[in-house]
Amino acid sequence: MTKLTLPPKLLKMGLDSPKALVLHLPARYEDETELWPIDEALEQGRFTAVQTQGTVLACQVVFRPRRQLLVTIEDHTGLLHLRWLNFYPSQQKQMAIGTHLRVRGEIREGHLGPEMVHPNVKAVAAEAPLPKSLTPVYPTSAGVSQTVIRKAVGQALLHPSTQTFLADLLPPQFMTEFLPGENWYSLHQAIYYLHQPPADADTQALLERTHPAWRRVQFEELLAQQISLKRAHAARRERRAPQLLVKPKLAAKQTKGKTLEQQLLAVLPFQLTQAQLRVWAEIQTDLAQSFPMNRLLQGDVGSGKTVVAALAAARAIDQGLQATVMAPTEILAEQHYLKMREWFEPLGVQIAWLAGSLKTKEKKLAQAQIEGGTAQLIIGTHALIQEAVHFANLGLAVIDEQHRFGVRQRLEIQQRVGSETVYCHQLMMSATPIPRTLAMTYYADLDVSVIDELPPGRKPITTKLIKSSRRSEVIAGLQDWLQKGQQAYWVCPLIEESEVLQLQTAEESYAQLNHALPQFKVGLVHGRLKSAEKAAVMAAFKANKIQLLVATTVIEVGVDVPNAALMVIEHAERFGYAQIHQLRGRVGRGSTDSVCLLMYAEPLSLAAKERLQTLREVADGFEIAERDLSLRGPGELLGAKQSGDGMLRYVDLQRDAWLVELAQLAANRILHEHAHMVDQQLLRWLGSRTEFLKA
């Protein structure tokens, strides 16, 4: 048996080889190893699935009130009804009168007596043997049955290549040496156990993925990931990057004896905080190295990351190199452009702006300035990583809100810059703090700086919950607020009417608020507006020509209007942790006490209720990030989902955090003492995904 012929539907799922099949592990299990007579099943199956069997007495299609299939089976102890609300004609034939069926499901009281709704059914002989192991239930996609997957996995486990593929690469003493108290399985034992656990297996431990068999698989996958990251870390130190030292290469008479960063600090209308000075010192140390910086600058909304990035850009420009700032949305990129232009243009720095909305002629002019080297500071969106863009001598790339870019996009700016032998320094920024477990697991090749202090004068934001039924009270309060000369945001989740989600929309709210507040100017901004229209509205809001801005989440990042100290978020139950935390960071930027009202519609789900209560009570971005990680998982927070590739398949970063630290230690040992097994370990668990761990 060397050739494994697989159905096309399995190939579409990526299950195209024995290796892929044996690593496609069950999501849960069903216990088909026990069989109860019908009378005992009626007692056992009230709160959990139970298996029984009997002969079909009746099989008919009934209309009560809708079309459904009703089957009655009996054994020597009693009767049981089976009901299907959706069914195929073939099912009716399968359960003809006189057929013997083995059925599994929960039992409830129906119109005719005890019944199972949509049970699992097999036509078998009365004396057919029971399976000796639990029945695996695999992750699947539409049109692919469990029967097809189970059969294919069973064949893969018997395939000659599987024995070799699952052979232990780690030395026998390795696992017990690291955790002597653990009952470690070999990899081969673990995989076979997870596909075919015995009837007496600890089903709770299997379901929670804490069973020793799961632990072995999780450890192996984490180990491969940590090895990959450590190799990337070492490889980066072998690359060449320009050393950006304090002494400028530009003529001293142009700068009056001062570096560009010194001039920048002199014109800033504020003093840097101690936290900003600390992280700038860390970045300076990196920029002075001969290998490329790969640093993540974290800081809560409004902590002052942009000015630190500007200092790094000044250091690169002082050396006669280019610097670029890339942001995920045009609004955020434009905010950077306006701020940087305000700071740098008076100092004689040539700035270029590149975004998708530019006309062809403007785009080509910006691209020519970038390629010719006349543009010293380049600011823009994804347009900066298009094929038509060629940097003359890029020394620094700043990527803001880095998690909003797909992993491939972050790799592109790494691969496209500089020449083949000289790389640029990279500074990534995020106002969404990375939880510690996530940083350990995905950012092992990333140095992290944290601005953990807000600039002086920033006021804490009071967050309040209010039911949407009190909307008229909110509007009345808003009127009082605007009459004091303050501005406000009104944020909505949708642009226009949706049949699926009947939510108050931005356009509807805009019309209603315009009518309710005729003495004030109300503006509307959303993602479908043209860039020029968006820019005009934002400029008018900043100049206080618009007092109330109705918006969708396009204002989530990058908007800085100190006079706007009130934010109302409609249907707050529809937003995630990070979104609301980012949105409310748009207020609290002036000297006025700031308020964020989370307006919600009832009834609330338990998850939404917990989320809103947490946001009301917690202002710490790191704690919110931990909650967000538990809710959404690492793929979304990292931008990995945009790559189309999953990251860790078997590990839960919160549940298995202790294994991450163990895998880090083990990876160091393997790289130093067992280097011959490294490539095999990476290929087995990561395949082509290793490149994503370098982003």
Image (spheres, helix red, strand yellow):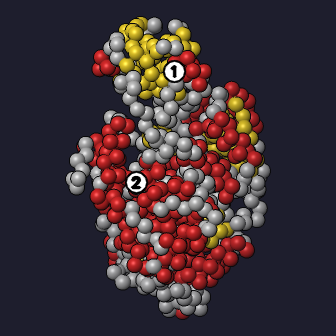
Mark 2 neighbour class, 10 Å CA radius: few under 14, some 14 to 19, many 20 or more: some
Residue occupying the point 59% across, 78% down: 283
Label 2 element class: loop
Residue occupying the point 42% across, 70% down: 169
Q: Position of residue 309 (x, y in %)?
A: 57, 72
Residue type beneath disc 1:
Pro
- Kindly identify which residue carries mark 1: 37
Mark 1 neighbour class, 10 Å CA radius: few under 14, some 14 to 19, many 20 or more: some
**In the foreground, 107 or 411:** 107
As measured in the structure, the alpha-carbon distance from the residue carrying label 1 to the one carrying label 2 is 37 Å
Residue occupying the point 57% across, 29% down: 48
- Kindly identify which residue carries mark 2: 23
| Residue 520 appears in view | no
Relative to 247, residue 497 above or below? above
Q: Is residue 468 left or right of residue 682?
A: right
Residue type beneath disc 2:
Leu
